[in-house]
Amino acid sequence: MTSPTILITGGTGTLGGHVVPLLRASGHDVRILTRHPRPDTDGVEYVTGDLLRNQGVEAAVDGAATVLHLAGGPKGDDEATRTLTRAASRAGVRHLVYISVIGADRVPLAWMRTKLESERSVADSGIPWTTLRAAQFHDLALTMVEKMARMPVFPVPGGLRLQPVDSREVAARLTELTLGAPSGLVPDMTGPHLYDLAALARPYLRRSGRRRPMLPVRIPGKAGRAYRAGANLTLEGAEVGKRTWEEFLAERLG
């Protein structure tokens, strides 16, 4: 008996690259909505479309029992999610799973607001749903540190702390949630340790053989106050990953 198809948006990204083989290993057929045509592979079907342009979405959700919404970008996530939830509702999808970010309801940034609006679209869709808020991935923290390390002086925003989490561990948790019953807003997922930016930078600079003086800077406005207050953190009640930033760097940089 064939398992119901699971549609994944963002299935070709960092997180999707970890989730897809886990779902395939569980015996499920996977369909991926992608903006660029790709040939189907064993158990993975690709449907070309674009959530922001509302192209190919109806075909992507057709016959899917579960939708895992991983796609995201610097802007437009709220509109993309509304497009997806409308199509999924019409198609009779039975479980809608969404990955959001810790602080979506507390940090006053435009990008965070689109994540919160996306959460609301999922919750108001009429489809049984599950939403997981995660901390920044190690991959994203590395990109940020790499960019800052290109400057002659490394800026360190005062009061900014992060709980970077391994994307593979988030993928494993999302797979579990996708295959389980709809659970609403589940506990956040963070990494095992809390770092300020200097603590993230030092092992990277050491491994890359660079030296940079650290320059304290201040994040202005409401966003700065929110970060200094830890609005982007979950210090209690979170699902905590095991892989540390240092272990990630050791694997990635050697």
Image (spheres, helix red, strand yellow):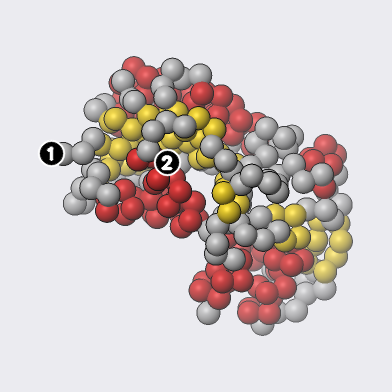
Where residue 211 appears, as percent x and y from the top left, is: 75, 79
The amino acid at mark 2 is Leu
Q: Residue 192: which quarter of the image? A: bottom right
Where residue 228 appears, as percent x and y from the top left, is: 82, 47
Label tally: 2
Which is more toward the observer, 5 or 42? 5
In the figure, 198 relative to 85: above or below?
below
Q: Residue 69: which quarter of the image? A: top left
Where residue 123 appears, as percent x and y from the top left, is: 51, 23
Which is more toward the observer, 189 or 88? 189
Where residue 98 appears, as percent x and y from the top left, is: 48, 36
What is the spatial separation of the Cα atoms under label 2 and label 1, in whole angstroms?
22 Å
Which is more toward the observer, 101 or 147? 101
Q: Label 1: which residue?
A: 1
Q: Residue at x 60, y 57 (%)?
A: 191
- Earlier in the chain: of badge 2 and badge 1, it is 1
Q: Residue at x 60, y 52 (%)?
A: 190
| Residue 34 visible in the current orientation | yes
Is residue 147 rendered to the left or right of residue 229? left
Tell which residue pokes out farthest to the bottom in this image: 209
In the figure, 235 relative to 100: above or below?
below
Which is more toward the observer, 161 or 55? 161
| Residue 9 visible in the current orientation | no
Question: Mark on residue 187?
Answer: none
The amino acid at mark 1 is Met
Which element type, helix, strand or loop, lies under badge 1? loop
Tell which residue pokes out farthest to the left in this image: 1
Q: Label 2: which residue?
A: 177
